[in-house]
């Protein structure tokens, strides 16, 4: 079992919990219950993007490429970026097996060095945002998404619904959703001043080792997301309840939605 403090260091540098989580977890990640919603989620993304005439897609925090590969299979030109080398290795293997071409790049979403060439951007299942350790880092990801998106483009992402922990117990919800062999969460402590949930996350990595992490995730209420996106340069922001594998405009956001689905547009001009 990995010690929480000592094992979090590499060459004297403290690695964040999300870096350690995904350094050797690609195969196990493929068995997590939430990946089973990929096809239904891609149905919605395809419908939204094709109806708007979007073809060039950036997947931020693409992980093992589950959305990127499926969207490429459906005719989109896709680039996927992720911080984890091991997750990207798995993504390359899956894309080759599927016979599709996806450009995968190892990049930090806080420092995206990409040209202004995408007309659609997705960031699914807390891909990068809202995992960062400060609000400023999370905001930088939204800014970078806007910078990479062509005018008139669409940014679609899911994030943790800050209304949920005000009405429900996060630890009880995650325990009820837990499946044997998947990640396990405990000792959740939600901070009303920061809207951050601190918890113990336990996984079994691809080598069969138990890894325990002190995780820290930021929940956002709809008004915050709207203001942050407008400040970053987006407009026409819509927020819905994110249901696993069943994204829909018919799902008005509720307090019992653990995640929310956000759709924002970049205006054709800078005058917003």
Image (cartoon, grey):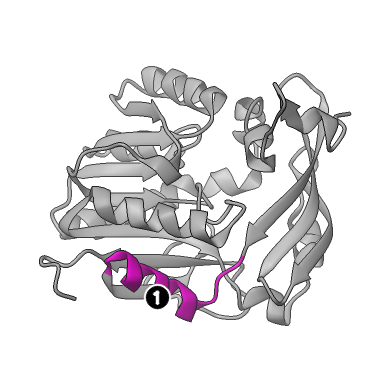
Which residue: 17% across, 42% down?
Answer: 117
Indicate yes or no whether the magenta region holds residue 241: no
Q: Visible in this render: residue 234?
A: yes
161 shown above or below 146: below
Indicate yes or no whether the magenta region holds residue 230: yes
Measuring from the top left, give residue 263's x and y in whole percent: 34, 66
Which residue: 52% across, 24% down?
Answer: 85
- The image quarter in which residue 9 lies: top right
In the image, which residues are magenta?
219-234
5 shown above or below 88: below
Q: Main secondary structure of the magenta part?
A: helix
Mark 1 neighbour class, 10 Å CA radius: few under 14, some 14 to 19, many 20 or more: many
Measuring from the top left, give residue 34's x and y in whole percent: 59, 49
The residue identified by callout 1 is: 226
Measuring from the top left, give residue 57's x and y in whole percent: 26, 43
Q: Visible in this render: residue 245?
A: no
Which residue: 50% across, 54% down?
Answer: 137
In the displayed structure, does residue 34 sit left or right of residue 5?
left
270, 80: nearer the viewer: 270
Measuring from the top left, give residue 80's x and y in whole percent: 37, 35
Q: Which type of secondary structure does the marked residue at label 1 adopt?
A: helix
150, 9: nearer the viewer: 9
* Number of marks present in the image shown: 1
Which residue: 54% across, 58% down?
Answer: 244
Quarter of the picture holding the N terminus: top right
- The image quarter in which residue 272 lies: bottom left
């Amino acid at each position: 079992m990995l010690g929480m403090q000592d094992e979090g260091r590499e060459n004297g540098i403290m690695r964040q919990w999300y870096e350690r989580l995904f350094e050797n977890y690609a195969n196990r990640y493929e068995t997590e219950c939430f990946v089973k919603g990929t096809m239904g989620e891609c149905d919605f993304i395809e419908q939204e993007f094709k109806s708007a005439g979007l073809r060039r897609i950036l997947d931020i925090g693409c992980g093992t490429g589950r959305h990127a590969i499926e969207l490429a299979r459906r005719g989109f030109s896709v680039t996927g970026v992720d911080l984890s080398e091991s997750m990207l290795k798995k993504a390359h293997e899956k894309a080759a097996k599927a016979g599709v071409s996806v450009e995968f790049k190892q990049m930090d979403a806080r420092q995206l060095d990409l040209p202004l060439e995408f007309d659609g951007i997705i960031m699914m299942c807390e891909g990068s945002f809202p995992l960062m350790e400060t609000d400023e880092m999370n905001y930088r990801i939204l800014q970078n998404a806007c910078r990479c998106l062509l005018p008139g483009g669409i940014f679609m992402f899911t994030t943790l619904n800050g209304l949920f922990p005000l009405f429900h117990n996060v630890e009880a919800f995650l325990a009820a959703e837990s499946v044997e062999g998947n990640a396990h969460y405990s000792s959740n402590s939600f901070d009303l001043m920061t809207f951050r949930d601190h918890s113990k996350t336990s996984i079994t990595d691809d080598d069969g080792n138990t890894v325990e992490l002190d995780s820290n995730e930021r929940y956002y209420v709809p008004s915050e997301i709207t203001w942050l996106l407008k400040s970053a340069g987006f407009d026409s922001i819509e927020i819905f309840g994110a249901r696993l594998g069943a994204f829909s405009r018919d799902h008005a956001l509720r307090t019992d939605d653990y995640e929310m689905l956000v759709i924002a547009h970049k205006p054709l001009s800078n005058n917003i």
